[in-house]
Amino acid sequence: MDDKLTGPVAAIIDKHRTTIAPMLAANGGAITRTALQNDTAVRTVAGYCYQLLPGLIRLAVKEPAFIEFVMMHREQLLNRLVEQPAQQR
C-alpha cells in the first residue's frame, strides 16, 4: 500500500501546496518541525488530502487507513512540503 499511496499524496502536496502549508504553519507563518509534530494538524492535512485523492483510490483505501498511513509516513511526505519551495528558488 505504501508504494501506491506515496505518489498520489506527493502529487496532491505539489498541486495544493498553497492550501496545505497554512494548515501546518506556526504563528509566524512558516512551517516548522514543531508543526510537523502536531498530530492534530497532520491529521487535518491528511483528511484534506484524502478528499483530493482520485475516486478509485478512495474506494480502495478508507479515510482512517489513509490518515494512519500519513501519520506513519509524515516525515517523508511532509518533508516534501517543507523542502520543495526552497528547491524552486
Image: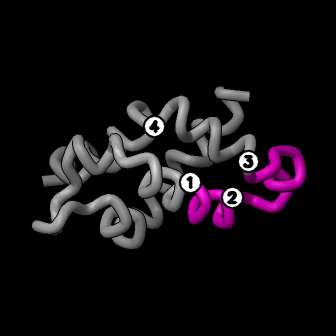
Residue nearest the observer in this picture, 45 or 12: 45
Identify the amino acid type marked 4: Arg
Contact? badges 2 and 3 (CB < 8 Å): no
Q: Which residue is mark 3?
A: 64
Q: Position of residue 74 (x, y in %)?
A: 45, 37
Range drawn in magenta: 46-63
Q: Earlier in the sequence, mark 2 or mark 3?
A: 2
Residue nearest the observer in this picture, 63 or 4: 63
**How many angstroms separate mark 2 from mark 3 (CA)?**
14 Å
Majority SS type along the magenta span? helix
**How many angstroms separate mark 3 from mark 4 (CA)?**
15 Å
Q: Which residue is mark 2?
A: 53
Q: Secondary structure at mark 3?
A: helix
Answer left or right for 34 relative to 55.
left
Q: Secondary structure at mark 2?
A: loop
Q: Which mark is residue 32?
A: none
Identify the amino acid type marked 3: Pro
| 74 in relation to 32, above or below | above
Q: Which residue is mark 1?
A: 46
**How many angstroms separate mark 1 from mark 2 (CA)?**
11 Å
Identify the amino acid type marked 2: Leu
**How many angstroms separate mark 1 from mark 3 (CA)?**
10 Å
What's the residue at 52%, 61% (across, down)?
Answer: 44
Q: Which residue is mark 4?
A: 74
